[in-house]
Image (cartoon, rainbow, N blue to C red):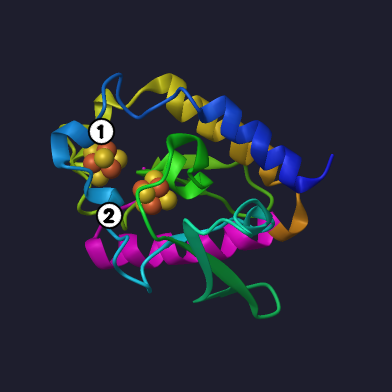
């Protein structure tokens, strides 16, 4: 199966799952979706995911400063308008969760330490995040971590998460 088809299957599994059983965007005014007028702010695409956003004028793909194995440049997807739910890239579908992965270890799903503006990352809110949602995110990244380029990407992304956690004085639990 081509990686593009795997991303599409993962999207389908996450289509109806959300962090809370209600629209959390109603609680915070969609804080994580307010970057349409900014050409430089976007979400990371996981390796191979960019093929799903080519030729879609609702999105722009740019190179990020984040590099992984052999200086490969990670891509950012920047939305130019509010997207349809069915169009969302994986980073948006899993927010505010993120995979924490070291080669040779299992994937863990943690709250993204970069998501400081998301109310769901507050200690009193995080216990309410749906277990079903978290489990589906875990299954998706267990599958993706079997692809060597994605494993390299996730390992390098975990360096960034560690740096953020160190800065914030957190551990990764
Ligand atoms: S994920 Fe967080 S920032 Fe995004 S809409 Fe929900 S509560 Fe708001
Ligand atoms: S791609 Fe869609 S879900 Fe993601 S930030 Fe843009 S509008 Fe929000």
Disc 1 residue lies near ligand 1 with CB under 8 A: no
- The first of marks 1 and 2 along the sequence is 1
Label 2 crowding class (10 Å Cα cut-off): few <14, some 14-19, many 20+? few
What residue sits right under mark 1 in the picture?
A: 126
Residue most extreme to the right: 1
Q: Nearer the viewer, residue 40 or 20?
A: 40
Q: Is residue 80 above or below residue 63?
A: above
> Given this view, does label 1 or label 2 mark the residue nearer the observer?
1
Could you say where residue 169 lies in the image, as x and y percent from the top left?
24, 60
Residue 116 among those drawn in magenta:
no
Image quarter of residue 46: bottom right
Q: Secondary structure at mark 1?
A: helix
Q: Quadrant of ligand 1?
A: top left
The numbered dot on residue 170 is 2
Magenta segment main secondary structure: helix
* 75 displayed left or right of 83: right
Q: Where, quadrant-wise, is the N terminus in this rendering? A: top right
Which quarter of the figure has residue 24? top left
Q: Residue 50: image x %, image y %?
A: 63, 58
Q: CA distance from mark 1 to mark 2?
A: 15 Å
* Residue 146 visible (yes or no): no
User: Above or below — where is 125 with respect to 112?
Assistant: above
For disc 1, the neighbor class at 10 Å (few under 14, some 14 to 19, many from 20) is some
At a point 36% along the width and 54% down the height, the residue shown is 81
Q: Is residue 53 above or below residue 25?
A: below
Residue at the image point whose x is 74% and y is 39% from the top = 5
- The tag on residue 74 is none
- The span picked out in magenta is 150-173
Residue 129 visible at all: yes
């Amino acid at each position: 199966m081509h990686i593009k088809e795997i991303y599409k299957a993962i999207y389908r599994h996450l289509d109806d799952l959300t962090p809370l059983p209600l629209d959390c965007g109603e609680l915070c005014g969609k804080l994580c979706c307010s970057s349409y007028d900014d050409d430089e702010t976007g979400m990371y695409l996981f390796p191979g995911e960019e093929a799903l956003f080519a030729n879609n004028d609702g999105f722009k793909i740019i190179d990020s400063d984040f590099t992984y194995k052999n200086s490969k440049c990670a891509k950012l997807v920047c939305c130019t308008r509010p997207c349809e739910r069915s169009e969302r890239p994986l980073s948006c579908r899993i927010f505010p969760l993120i995979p924490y992965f070291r080669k040779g270890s299992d994937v863990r799903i943690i709250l993204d330490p970069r998501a400081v503006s998301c109310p769901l990352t507050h200690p009193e809110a995080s216990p309410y995040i749906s277990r079903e949602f978290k489990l589906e995110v875990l299954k998706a990244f267990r599958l993706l971590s079997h692809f060597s380029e994605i494993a390299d990407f996730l390992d390098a992304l975990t360096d960034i998460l560690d740096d953020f956690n160190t800065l914030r004085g957190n551990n990764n639990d």
